[in-house]
Image (cartoon, grey):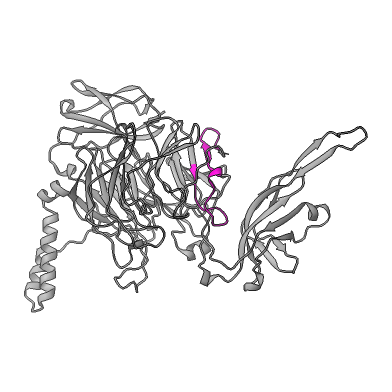
Amino acid sequence: MPHWIRRKIVLPVAAAAILGGANVPPLYSATVDWLHDRKINSPEYKAANGFWQVVELPKGQRVNAIHAALLPSGRILLIAGSGNDREQFQAGTFKTLVFDPVTGHTTLVPTPTDLFCAGHAFLPDGKLLVAGGTLRYEVLEQDVKKAGGTITVKNESPEGPRTFPKGSVLDSVDGHKYILGDDVTVPAATKVTYPPHHPGDQPKVVITAGEAKVWVDAAGEGAEYAVDHKAQYEFEGLTGVDHHNYYALADKITMDKQDYQGRKEAYEFNPVTEQYERVQDMHEKRWYPTLTGLSDGSVLAVSGLDGGGQVVDGTKNEIYDPKTKTWTTRSDLNHYFPTYPALFQTGKDNVLFFSGSNSGYGPATKGRDPGLWDLSNNDFQTVPGLRDADQLETSASAWAGPVQNQKIMVVGGGGVGESSKATSRIDVIKLGAENPHFEPGPSLPQPTRYASLTQLPDDTVLISNGASDYRGRGATDNHTARIYHPDTNTLTYAADPHVGRNYHSAAVLLPDGRVLTVGSDPLFRDKKNSITGTFEQRLEIYSPPYLFRGGARPAIGDGPTALTAGQSATYKTGNPDDIAAVRLIRPSAATHMLNTEQRSLILDYKTTVDSVTVTLPTSPALMPPGPYMLFLLNKDGVPSEAKWVSVA
């Protein structure tokens, strides 16, 4: 076991020492612990159920892992940002850690802004696009000291855009002052000149003011700063024509609850330099957005909370072009989603599937129905059959087996908001059917919110962790794992994780076939909900049963690392007659039960005396360009360690 892995072990000598004492409860407990530890460490148990190992990183190298992504280097990107820690946010302390699961080496990476609750997706060149994050933490109504609200800044000058920096002051007619919560750039006014209708008339000039929205806070505390009607505000310090051209309007400024607010910055994380590289900002600020890679390598951004704490409207969905590193608003792709919606690129170009899984914000009755979204004409076709459809918040979704089968599973979930509702439901839908609809799968052993789903090289799916109540209230972490078998639509038992995980947890498949789990952010740590929870910074690695079946694992030798759709490629291997399957798996980028990046593909193959030749699918819808792991599997279902390839 590597020195950086720590696991609680009760040795026989310790149990024997306790046997000599007179205290029966400690004796019984220690004996049970020892017997359990011996059981889960036995070869027979590991071969049937797998094995978990806790990883404790050195102090100073631990982060609140809100986001986890497997980089094409084989290292793990753990993004915390402020880590759901208001003090860190106010101090401007933002963290990112790169962790090597082979050596245990860690590197803290300079983090340019608060990427807590951003969105992410892999790009064709292997970089990870990270966009959005946290501009402002929520303030509950009872804690609001200063009135606030969203205002619309107007620019009546056609000469050009104007930027007002964060902290600029606005004055109301009654003398109250309000402060801009962020920089805001207001586009120039449009000026249109119409010819005169009659000879001798003057041309008609119509100026339409440019506008942009931004949050403001009252300069002072108290309800006297609240405004319950439409009003105009003037920028302090502007004179002459500027005083006329630049002003602000607001419907109201209140002492109501103030929600989280999103950022619009976007970055590409470079897996070679392990640095963030700034690209063009999104047009909309987004907190809890989904970024979905499309078949042409571009990325669609939807939903999230904007700079005023409202869910971004469906007319403001936008697409990132990795070639130009720019964003384009696509008002024609008009569909509203709750935050962090689970959107999958299906096997058809321009068609996405929304499974219904989401992470919360938005009305309970708007945009939550699962369905197929055709980007070519903006048609959205809902699909029927999902059980417990009112409990999709904090559910998890993933491809059930290889993507060629076009099956997606929806697992667990709960009611909207802080609901105590939770479900053990697993439902599966075959998207390629003539009339796609959900069908029942097996049930989890208990109701589960916040489960993590990890596609394994042997076509099964690991379902791990979760809690039966909102953010693990009442010490309700499940401490369970199961393996779903898509071919039989059944569950089998997997070893119990040592660490409980609920909100802000994630899991990723590693190149050696193991699974890394991270995070957990409970509200409380006890059954009485009296002890405030702390963020779980321990990691845990699961070794599936296929790693304990004995014999040599398949191995992939020399061969090309840059591939194209439809291409055949040959790789050296030591025992080609034992190869039974070849899989190509896209790496995970996971957060908040959302991991739509991962997908597994069946590859056709042929063997020779010392090599295997694989053939890639031709469809970029099935296989969006980007980094992938190539696995060989033997007749016992044991995978090789992966070989990284880049698919164009």
Quadrant of residue 75 within the rendered picture? top left
Can you name the residue that lies furthest to the top here? 608
Residue 575: where, in percent of width, then height? 17, 28
The one nearer the camera, 259 or 324, is 259
Res. 511 visible in picture: yes
Q: Is residue 312 magenta?
A: yes
Q: Is residue 233 magenta?
A: no
- The relative height of residue 156 versus residue 254 in the rendered view (above or below) is above
Q: Which residues are magenta?
A: 301-328
Along the horizontal axis of the image, is 93 left or right of 527? Answer: right
The one nearer the camera, 348 or 541, is 348
- The relative height of residue 145 versus residue 130 in the rendered view (above or below) is below
Can you name the residue that lies furthest to the right here? 200
Res. 70 visible in picture: no
Residue 252: where, in percent of width, then height? 64, 62
Which residue is located at x 29 percent, y 33 percent? 405
Give the quadrant of the C terminus: top left
Along the horizontal axis of the image, is 264 left or right of 545? Answer: right
Residue 551: where, in percent of width, then height? 13, 37
Quadrant of residue 326 within the rendered picture? top right
The one nearer the camera, 500 or 93, is 500
Residue 2: where, in percent of width, then height? 24, 51
